């Protein structure tokens, strides 16, 4: 029998700090949860815009934009079949006066 994983993600932005994760339902066939990242901060440092969010990581590629991200890990049983479904999302687009700070 194939195991499927369904996710509900309500994403306010691509950054997250101490995000809240609420389990909606769980059984042997699916896991449904609601994910809400907390606030992030945008500031300027010299010639760059800095995105920061406590408790997040940034890409390790030198020269890449330092965009904070959070990871959520879920164990999948051996031989499990995974399907991820994004049911809703919210996003905000902000103009930046300077380029993003590189790593």
Image: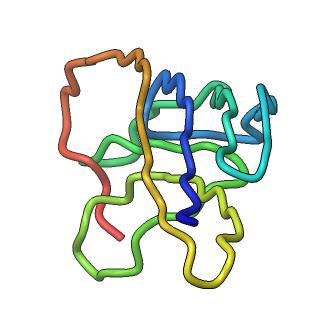
Could you say where residue 74 lies in the image, as x and y percent from the top left? 69, 62
Q: Residue at x 26, y 18 (%)?
A: 93
Q: Residue at x 41, y 32 (%)?
A: 86
Could you say where residue 61 lies in the image, as x and y percent from the top left? 31, 81
Q: Which of the pair 46/25 is nearer the observer?
A: 25
- Answer left or right for 59 relative to 100: right
Q: Can you say which quadrant of the picture contains the N terminus?
A: bottom right
- Answer left or right for 73 relative to 95: right
Q: Can you say which quadrant of the picture contains the C terminus?
A: bottom left
- Please identify the quarter of the rendering in which residue 94 is found: top left
Could you say where residue 24 lies in the image, as x and y percent from the top left? 77, 26
- Please identify the quarter of the rendering in which residue 49 is found: top left
Image height of 63 relative to 53, above or below:
below
Q: Which of the pair 54/29 is nearer the observer?
A: 29
Image height of 52 relative to 77, above or below:
above
Image height of 3 relative to 79, above or below:
above
């Amino acid at each position: 029998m194939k195991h499927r994983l369904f996710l509900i993600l309500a994403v306010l932005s691509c950054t997250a700090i101490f995000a809240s994760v609420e389990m909606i339902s769980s059984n042997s066939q699916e896991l449904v949860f609601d994910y809400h990242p907390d606030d992030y901060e945008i500031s300027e440092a010299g010639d760059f815009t800095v995105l920061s969010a406590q408790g997040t990581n940034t890409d390790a590629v030198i020269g890449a934009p330092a965009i904070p991200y959070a990871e959520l890990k879920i164990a999948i049983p051996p031989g499990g079949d995974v399907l991820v479904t994004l049911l809703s999302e919210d996003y905000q687009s902000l103009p930046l006066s300077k380029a993003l700070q590189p790593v």
